[in-house]
Image (cartoon, rainbow, N blue to C red):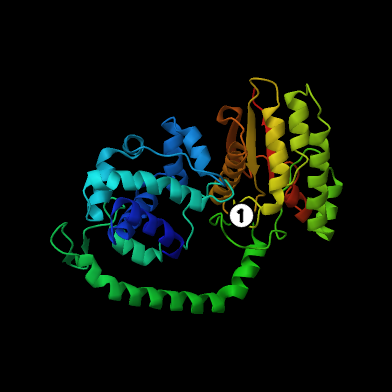
Amino acid sequence: MSMLDGISREAAQRFGLGDKAGLLVTSLLGFIRNSQPGGFTGFVDRFRQAGLGNQLHSWLGKGPNAELEPRQLEQVMGRDNVARIATSAGLSPAGATPALAFLVPKIIDLVTPDGVVPATLPAGLGGPAGVAAGIAGTAGGYADTTLSGVRNEPGTGPGLRKLIPILALILLGFLGWQLLGRNRSAGVERQTAAVNDSVYTEPAAPVDPAATPTTPTAGVGADAGADVNADPRATVDAAMRRTSDALAALGTGYSARQLTDALNLNIVNFASGSAAIPAESRGVLNQSADAIQGAPAGTVLEIAGHTDNTGDPAANERLSQARADAVRRYLVSRGVENARLTSRGYGAARPAVDDATDAGRFRNRRIEFTVVK
């Protein structure tokens, strides 16, 4: 839990939790991981749905975090869930609730340094999944008071602490096994990631962003396929320059259609199987967010994700939805109103051109903006 050591220490000092602060963080992470529909994204969306969008926006990316009141935390997470998390850490709900209200914005801020909400918590947050699962239990995704037959009743002695040496050994063994496995399989994974764009993986997959670019239909033209076969990076860079120039040329009083024509010049160059927004795309997306905010009042745009026809159709649809959602979340994080954007993944159901060639498949893997209203 190295990423959370500082937050745990701060909570321990501020609320007098001692070493139970670490257990409280672990219990909270277990709740987020194991009990939330939609994973971390679903957890974050709870605050938006509860009307706390302005506070949530301050927790995403850089800048000071707006405070979360204990009553607001209970409103979003539910008193019963807060009580279970507190009990799992050996704390009373009254003692744990203010600390949880302090921890939640800190954790969201830590996980979203660029303002983009990942579908799942980072792998390095909270330790190996096997250890976290042992701590978190299975019933509700919270840190359980029972572990390997040793019960930690609040006030009767820290049973869980007796297992710390055992957990440390398990952790060391797990990390050694992971390191050995990665060394053996790294070459195979790199080849697999570059070959098949339709295999769905978590958004944080670190692969070569030039391996499988995505491209829209509008403004790219028939020559794009030939360009990408020769130099995919040059194709992506040229598309971003055209998009930036077109957005800058909109001036004032532009229509929604003129806006989407400019937006669809862009290529969001997702890595193979990933829904993580590439760093190179953020500048143009920032400019896109400003342009969308300047569109006529009442304008609603759909962000559509598309794939080629390679691989499993269900996986393609999930991947295209994840990518469309990622672009939408990024634009919202840059100030675009939620109501102005929708997102939908179509998979391979709406190809722009024939999928028979590499160039055609390249063109069909795209993010596309359309005017809904």
What residue is rendered at 63% in x and 42% in y? Answer: 305
In the image: residue 244, left or right of residue 65: right
Q: Residues within 10 Å of mark 1 (few under 14, many from 20)?
A: many
Q: Residue at x 61, y 34 (%)?
A: 335
Q: Position of residue 192 (x, y in %)?
A: 62, 66
User: Callout 1, which amino acid?
Assistant: Ser
Quadrant in which the C terminus is drawn:
top right
Residue 97 visible in the shown view: yes
Percent across and percent down for residue 338 are 56, 31
Residue hosting label 1: 198
Residue 189 is left or right of residue 27, and the answer is: right
Give left or right: position of 138 versus 339.
Answer: left
Residue toward you, 202 or 340? 340
Residue lying at the far left of the rendered structure: 156
Q: Is residue 259 above or below residue 2?
A: above
Estimate the x, y position of residue 83 in percent, counting from the top left: 24, 45
Which image quarter holds the N terminus? bottom left
Mark 1, secondary structure of its residue: loop
Please tell me in which quadrant of the rendered image residue 97 appears: top left
- Residue at 69% x, 45% y: name it: 366
Residue 230 horizontal/vertical position (percent): 84, 60
What number of labels is visible? 1
Q: Is residue 330 above or below residue 1?
A: above
